[in-house]
Amino acid sequence: MSLMQAIKARDASLLPSRRDEAWRYSDLRAAIREIPGASPEASRPTGPPPLVDVEADHEILVLNGRAEAKGFLAVAGAPITLRLRIVSDAEHTLHQSALTLDLEPGADLTLIETYEGQGSAYVSGFSLAISLGAGARLERIVLVDEPADAISISRSEIELQPGARLAQTVVCSGARLQRHETEVRHPGGGADVRLDGLYLLDGKRHADLTTVLAHTAPDGTTRQLTKGLAKDQARGVFQGRILVEEGADRTDARMGHHALLLNDGAEIDAKPELEIYADEVSCAHGNTVGSLDDAALFYMRSRGLPEAEARALLMQAFVGEVVDRIEHDGARAAVQAWVARRLEALA
Amino acid sequence: MLSIENLHVSIGDKEIIKGLSLQVPAGEVHAVMGPNGAGKSTLSYTLAGRAGYEVTEGMATLDGEDLLALEPNERAAKGVFLSFQYPLEIPGVPTLTFIRAALNAQRKARGEGEVSAPAFLKLAREAAGKLKIDFDMLKRPLNVGFSGGEKKRMEILQMAMLSPRLLILDETDSGLDIDALRIVSEGVNAMRSPDRSMLVITHYQRLLDYIKPDRVHVLAGGRIVASGGPELALELEAKGYDQYAKAAA
């Protein structure tokens, strides 16, 4: 069952629903009663792109499912920055597209991937197939900023060769149903993966960060940290699965998910999973869901900070750990600025 | 001057403070001593404005201004500073960032301009030096992983930098060894000034060897049951609180 199959067959009953384990918390079938008509062509956005402070060497635009290129090849040599803008500008219609991204052995790429939405109630599907050659390095920074009533499904499959390094940070503000899914084949052999996420939700927004990572051979490391804030009736979903296959000995993997509920009506669903079939493995996961500490808030206020400012400072500190792990200086600063604006709405 | 008149405070259905009156003129240091459960911490939290401490009767004013109607941060901007018995840990917020945000929030509330970064750093270096605090420590998240003594020093540091008109020290001696007690007390004594009132809340007389009070009050059963000069603290140390438990009952 997938969005693509359902679109092809124009049959909403083929959409994944809460009866499918992987979609238990994000019922796409319930969100899409009928497959909508195709989105019209969209004009190029006139405004500046999100994360505007990041200078890019190349840009690929995807406008309502129409991609300017089928893919991108990063060659070895000097570091390259690619801006990939997935732009939706539609009302009640559907669009989807797919792209490939290949990194030659030794290539060094920073991918700034932004999902920008205008209009309302559209359905957007996007898939990305990424391969990293031996020793290649990819830092992928994803920002998903869409209207509250949009439905947006993004899926990427990433394959690494030994010695490659993948660092990913997905930052999102949710939508009616927003899912960002990453599947990684980890080859071990000194390859290193960081998979981070951050969701900042209010209103009735729903964000689902799902990752499936398989260690397939010995000596691989994975670090994963996802954090989230949910306010009003928002719902945050984290599904993280790390599979250490037979023979993937000496794998070293850490997974953490930590979220704060900012009021009673909000909801967090977390499903961290570690499945281990190898030896001498060092794996750990931690998962916490709490709320802002009232005693700490009173302490801060007693020193003169107004309540909203005290809350914002605590929230900033909480999510800062994820943002600080972004390696690209310009991207980190730009994400910091975006997060600060978003936190004003949540304070 | 802090003036408390016939204060009654309840937590839930339980009345803890039952008609407390107290005046602390500017320039004076007053100690409030009392047995466990007398209402000492309730008094300090009520003055600072903690939620859940309901004032059912009476008033508290600072220089004639009603404190009880104000939010905790508004009280801070008016010059109220409570040094916590157990200072909270603020994960992820560097100490300097926190103090600067607090100072500027207070200044903004008073219609004053923000302190520039260089001026703030100069102020912080001076204050830290006096309290023998390693400046690098101020780059760490406030109180996270700090020892009891370090946390109390951070309280005094904040007090020195925020320069309040009313200091409330809630069991500041708890958890301090003799050396830390001396450093903290020197920090407090350095803040004595003709326009500043101090309320020192403590169970033990020990702290008052270092911070000499002008007046000592005994709090028992939610009321001030005796007041006197510094000699009253010594008498309490010798005879205990038993004699007042009866008076309060």
Image: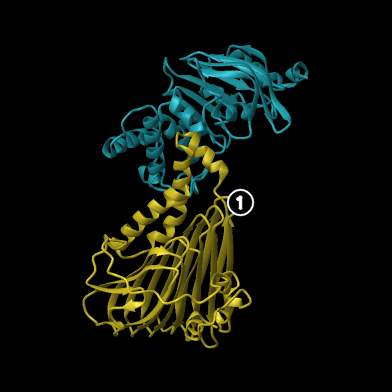
Vertically, is B166 above or below A322?
above
Residue under the image location 38 percent in, 75 percent down: A166
User: Measured from the top left, where is residue A161 in percent x and y?
Assistant: 38, 85
Name the spot of residue A50 as percent of width and height, x first: 32, 62
- Residue farthest along the bottom direction in this orientation: A247
Disc 1 secondary structure class: loop
* Label 1: chain letter: A
Residue at the image point whose x is 32% and y is 80% from the top:
A136
Q: Which chain is cyan?
A: B
Q: Nearer the viewer, residue A289 or A343?
A: A343
Q: Quadrant of residue A236?
A: bottom right
| Chain identifier for the yellow-coloured part of the image | A
- Where's residue B95, x and y in %? 41, 43
Q: Is residue A322 positioned above or below A102 on the image?
A: above
x 33%, y 28%: residue = B112
Q: Which residue is mark 1?
A: A264
